[in-house]
Image (spheres, helix red, strand yellow):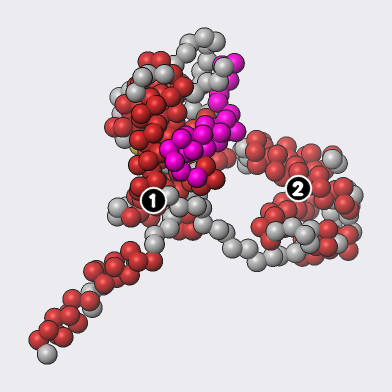
Amino acid sequence: MSAATEAFLAMLAAERGAAANTLAAYRRDLDGAEEAIGDLAAAPRDAVASLAQEWASLAPSSVARKASALRQFFGFALDEGWRSDDPSGALPRPRTRRPLPKLLGHADIAALFARAELEAAGDDAKAVRLLALIELLYGSGLRASELVTLPLSSVPRDAPFLTVTGKGGATRLVPVGARALEALGRWQAVRPGDPPSRALFPSKDGKPLSRVRLFQLLKGLAGRAGLDPARISPHVLRHAFATHLLEGGADLRVLQTLLGHADISTTQIYTHVDAARLVALVNARHPLAHPLATRATSD
C-alpha cells in the first residue's frame, strides 16, 4: 500500500475516530484498487475509469462502497496537494437499494428466550452469559461490536442505563429493562474472575468475547430453540428491538437515539412495519376515517 493511502487511513483514525472494522474495510478497498491501477495519488483518470470494468462482477452495494472509499481518498489527496485533479467523476455510481434485515416475529423471540431461560435455569455460567447477551441485544438494541466491548464498569448501579461507545467513538446512554438488569445480575454472580478482565463478557483468555463467537452462540441457541439459525444474528435481534418498539408506538426520533443513528434516514430504513398495520393505522387514526363512516351511516 502506498504512503498516500497509509496517510489517508491514519487521518481517518486520528481525525474522524474511525473504528477498527471501518479502517480494515477501507484498507481492503484501497489496496485492491492500487493492485489494479497503481498508486492512487498518481493514477490517471482513465485508469480510475477502468475500475468500473474491474468491479463489473461485484454487487452494486460492493461497487458503491469501493467507489465511496476512493472518492474520500481523492478528496484527501487534493487537500494535501498530492493531486491537482479529482478523478472521482470517472468512478461508477451504481444504484443501490439498502435491503431490510431479516424479520423475527414475536413468536420467534418468545421461542428463543424460552430456550435461553430454560438452559440458564441451572446457573451454568455459559448459559447465564448467553441469556444476558440476548437480553441486551433485543432489550436494548445494541450492535454486536458495542455489546462485546462493554467494560465491566458499564453495568448500571444507580440508574438503569448503560453507557455505550458506538460508531466513531460516539457515546450514548441506553436504557436497560428490568429483565436485562436481572440477567446481568445473575451473570455477575457467576462471571469468572480468573483471569482478571475488565470486559463485562470475557472469553477464556480474559479478552472481550469476539463478535464471531457471539454469532456462533446465537446460531447454536436458535437451532436448539427450533428456529432456522440462518435467520438469527445480533443484527437481526437489534432490528427486532427497533421493529417491535415501533409497532408498540415508539417515536422514530426516540428510536434514532436508542439505536445510535447519526441520520434519521438510517432509522427509517432500519425499522420496518408491515403493510397491514399501516393500513389499519390509517383507517383508525386518519381524521377523515370517522366522519366518512358517520356520514355513510346517516345516509
Q: Amino acid at mark 1?
A: Gly
Q: Secondary structure at mark 1?
A: loop
Picture residue at 54% right of the left edge, 10% below the top? 195
Q: Which comes sooner in the sequence, label 2 or label 1?
A: 2
In which quarter of the view is residue 183 placed? top left
In the rendered view, tell whether residue 114 sits above or below residue 258.
above
**Residue 283 location (% of width, % of height):** 26, 72
In which quarter of the view is residue 287 placed? bottom left
- The residue labelled by disc 1 is 105
**Residue 105 location (% of width, % of height):** 39, 51
In the rendered view, tell whether residue 42 sits above or below residue 9.
below
Q: Amino acid at mark 2?
A: Asp
Picture residue at 54% right of the left edge, 45% below the top? 230
Q: How many marks?
A: 2
As for residue 183 lying within the magenta part, the answer is no
- The residue labelled by disc 2 is 29
Crowd tier of the residue under label 2, counting other residues whose Cα lies within 10 Å: few below 14, some 14–19, many 20 or above = some
As for residue 221 lying within the magenta part, the answer is yes
Q: Quadrant of the C terminus?
A: bottom left
Instruction: Give, as a single range, the part of the protein colored magenta.
Output: 205-228
Crowd tier of the residue under label 1, counting other residues whose Cα lies within 10 Å: few below 14, some 14–19, many 20 or above = few
**Residue 277 location (% of width, % of height):** 33, 64
